[in-house]
Image (cartoon, helix red, strand yellow):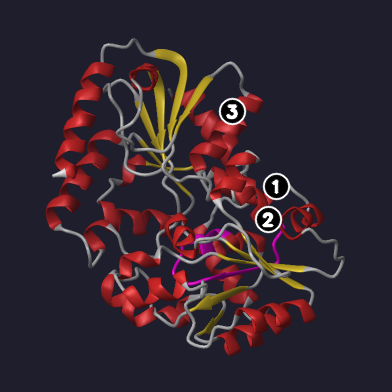
Amino acid sequence: MKNWLFRIYMYLMKIGARFTKIRENKIVVLNGAGRSGSNGYLFAKYMRKNHPEYEITVVEPWPSSHLPLATWREIGAAKFILTTHQPFKIHAKQVNIQFWHGIPLKRMGIMANNTKRKTDMRNAKLWQKNADVVCSSSDLYETLMSACCAIETTKYQKVGFPRLDALKHPALSKAQLLTALFKVQDEQAQIAIYMPTFRYEMEDEQIMAQIKAGNFFALPDFDAESLNEALKAKHQYLIVKLHPYEMQLLGTQTSHYSNIAYLNNDYLFAHDYDLYELLGNTDMLITDYSSIYFDYLTLDKPIIFVTNYLRQYEQKRGLLLGPYEEVVPGICVKTQAELLAGLSAPDRKQQKRQYWLHLTNQLQDESACAAIYALMANQY
């Protein structure tokens, strides 16, 4: 019932916004990616700094049933509508540039195990109707996205992703990041960041209960005290960045441990950062099935994969590439003991990282923001 009401609301707001005249220098970013590698938000920052002749509005969160009519008029007035999730526009004359929000590892759309055909077909029609340009970084990316969303090849433009520009040019130095999140100075410091996928969709109450109890890794032998002591002994620091839903389950915004810090969206919004503006000065990534690891390859730094729920995730949603353990360019761990061993000697698969980097990013030395601006200015 709620979905139908929301679709009716969107339909009515679109009708109202159609009476707004399009302005040639107006850009609207519909940001559904928050502050975790948001191509839209980062491109907006670039445009405001480098091209003030454009008027740019960021609408977030998107989609939302609580937007004022004035915001809908802004959307209706935009020549360019930039989206991080489903393509969207109000007028046929508007140009939708689809950034998306990650190179897909997890199955989605018509490839997923946990979606309905009727919904998948409706979403595929939206891509065909509304997406004018789909930003791409490689042939492999285009193959994966088309498999999931049935996107025509003519829509792709290899211009890259703004989030990778931010990854290569951090807003904070490593020392500043350490001071900001851990309140310490340590010239020997190694900073790891843990970013798992959205685990709620596995529909496993046991996993959610473990996270709620403080076991953010959901590992069978988790012990926060011993983890912190092991990190401390090696001058290692762990940033924990969970999905906002999981952070709410955890029920705390600060860690009680010297070498473990929680990074939440409130901090990012308060300081006008996107996560990727900080990520470049970390030393290693810990993840599970999140596509963030494809982006992290740009840094050529170690990656550790937590795989204790791999088979369950493959069955529930599915992965586009496999066998998983053979595909991922890093060590796989299922316990805290294995994780600590991996943290002691993580850099084992540089050649494999380089292999996957070249497959997923054919534009490594180019500025995505500059390329996207040139596309907008010269072709439209």
Density class for disc 2 (Cα within 10 Å; few <14, some 14-19, many ≥20) is many
- Please give the range of residues in magenta: 281-295
Query: Can residue 345 be seen at all in this image of the molecule?
Result: no
Closer to the camera, 40 or 248? 248
Where residue 153 sits: x, y (%)?
Answer: 32, 46
Q: Residue at horizontal 46%, vertical 58%?
A: 248
Determine which residue is flagged by label 1.
169
Q: Residue at horizontal 79%, vertical 52%?
A: 176
Determine which residue is flagged by label 2.
280
**How many circles with numbers are drawn on the protein?**
3
Mark before the other along the chain sequence, 1 or 3: 3
Query: Can residue 226 be seen at all in this image of the molecule?
Result: yes
Say if the magenta span includes residue 190: no
- Kindly state the secondary structure of the residue where label 1 is placed: loop
Cα gap from disc 1 to disc 2, whole angstroms: 7 Å
Where residue 122 sits: x, y (%)?
Answer: 17, 45
- Amino acid type, callout 1: His
Determine which residue is flagged by label 3.
47
Where residue 124 sits: x, y (%)?
Answer: 22, 47
Cα gap from disc 3 to disc 2, whole angstroms: 21 Å
- The reply to whether callout 1 and callout 2 are in contact (CB within 8 Å) is yes
Say if the magenta span includes residue 283: yes
